[in-house]
Image (tube, rainbow, N blue to C red):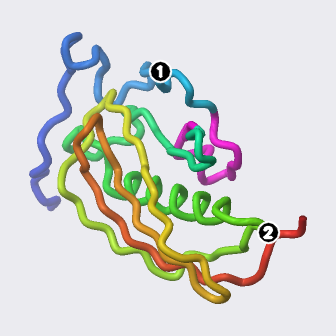
Amino acid sequence: MSAPNSAAPLRRISASEGGVRVGSTDMESNPPDGFKPLFRTSPFLDHNGPFFYCENDDGTFVVGVRIQPKHANARGIAHGGLLMTLCDIALGYRKTRSQTPSPLLTTASVTTDFAGSAKLGDWVEAHVDVHKVGGRLAFANCYLKVGDERIVHASAVFARTGDRPG
């Protein structure tokens, strides 16, 4: 005998809520002006994206994603694993590009705190503050934002294994 399904049933979303149906693949990823496809990708990121980035005047950048039905959990909001992935790639890529030569970094630890959520159609941006890139370790914080609202905070430590060839 199977356990009853306690998750909320999937529902059609009205046009005023974005006009897409949970489980649909009809939503566009349409990033805001200034964002372009992420400069580096992988089979994992291709499967879970598309991810975009926008360079700031100071050489830093923001990574973003439009929440699509494939990113949703059973409640119809962005899955926490997707949000953690966004933090991890933004933290790593931002730290890698924070100095020359670019350090080779491997995620050692990511601590994530959820203070909100993202709905279907929301544009989520990852803003990273690099604290230090040392000889062996790198430290940074990431804040995920929907509009002006911070929905996730992540703190990460990366192991430095060398530098990328110039």
In the rendered image, the vertical position of residue 66 relative to residue 144, given as above or below: above
Residue 111 at what x, y percent from top left? 35, 74
Q: Amino acid at mark 1?
A: Glu
Left or right of 49 on screen, residue 19: left
Where is residue 7? Give x, y as percent: 14, 48
> Relative to 76, is 1 above or below?
below
The answer to which of 21 and 148 lies nearer the viewer is 148
Q: Please report the residue visible at 16 percent of the width from the left and 59 percent of the height from the top.
A: 2
The residue mark sitting in front, 1 or 2, is 2
The magenta segment is 37-54
Of the pair 82 and 94, the residue shown nearer to us: 94
Report the residue at 27% width, 18% height from top. 18
Q: Which residue is mark 1?
A: 28
Q: Residue furthest bottom?
A: 136
If you read the primary sequence from the N terminus, does the residue marked by circle 1 or circle 2 appear first? 1
Lateral position of residue 24 relative to residue 115, left or right: right
Residue where numbered disc 2 is placed: 101
- Quarter the N terminus occupies: bottom left
Question: Among all residues in the image, which is located at the extreme right?
Answer: 166
Question: Measured along the vertical axis of the image, is residue 69 above or below residue 74?
Answer: above
Farthest residue, direction front: 58
Mark 2 is on which residue type?
A: Pro
Which element carries disc 2, helix, strand or loop? loop
